[in-house]
Amino acid sequence: MQRTMILAAGALAALGFGAVPALAQGPVTEVQTARDLGRVCDPQTTGVPRLESIAYCQGFLTSFGQYHALAHPAGRSRQLFCMPTPGPTVAVSGLAFARWTEANPQHAAGPALDGLLRWAEAVHPCPAEPTRRTPRAAR
């Protein structure tokens, strides 16, 4: 009888009846989506896991910014986004990105890097390029 109860409990757990609700998710340990990165940038944990999350977020944002600066140097090519001078701190940017992912759920399931680029383009757009005059034809 006891063996039957254990098997039944195991079967129910396997079917998800013993699953923890989605709202009670633990800390993110792997970043794949923009939602994951947003949760890492504003962790709802305490202690060392919180510090690890913040460090991961700040490293991700810093490397993203450095790559953009190398791939799209100012004055040489059209930048994807333009940071103000002085720019926000990495910590402020991480929290702002986390808020953006909450406010833009249509992008939350996409790749983390795609979401970060969409956020940067939305909050730090580049000024419009001046229209160039075409040279007049020789008369």
Image (cartoon, grey):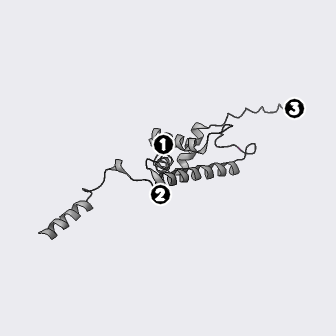
Residue at 26% x, 57% y is 18
Specify few, some or many for label 3: CA neighbours under 10 Å numbering under 14, 14-19, or 20 or more: few
| Tag 3 and tag 2, C-beta contact below 8 Å | no
Q: Position of residue 97 (x, y in %)?
A: 53, 42
Prevalent SS, magenta region: loop
Q: Which residues are magenta?
A: 76-80
Circle 1 crowding by C-alpha within 10 Å: few under 14, some 14–19, many from 20: many
Mark sitting on residue 133: none
> What amino acid is found at the position of numbered circle 3 in the picture?
Ala
The residue mark sitting in front, 2 or 1, is 2
Residue 1 sits in quarter:
bottom left
**First-in-chain label (3 vs 1):** 1
Identify the residue position indicated by label 1 in the image. Answer: 101
In the current view of this chain or complex, which residue is farthest to the front? Answer: 47
Tags 2 and 1 touching, CB below 8 Å: no
Image quarter of the C terminus = top right
Spatial CA distance of label 3 from label 1 is 54 Å
The kind of secondary structure element at disc 2 is loop
Q: Residue at x 62, y 37 (%)?
A: 125
Q: Residue at x 68, y 37 (%)?
A: 86
Q: Identify the amino acid type marked 2.
A: Glu
Return the x and y of residue 57 as percentages of the image width and height.
54, 50
Q: Secondary structure at mark 3?
A: loop
The residue at which mark 3 appears reads as: 138
Q: Residues within 10 Å of mark 2 (few under 14, many from 20)?
A: few
Residue, disc 2: 30
Residue at disc 1, secondary structure: helix
Check if mark 3's residue and mark 1's residue have beta carbons within 8 Å. Answer: no
Q: Nearer the viewer, residue 109 or 89?
A: 89
Q: Nearer the viewer, mark 3 or mark 2?
A: 2
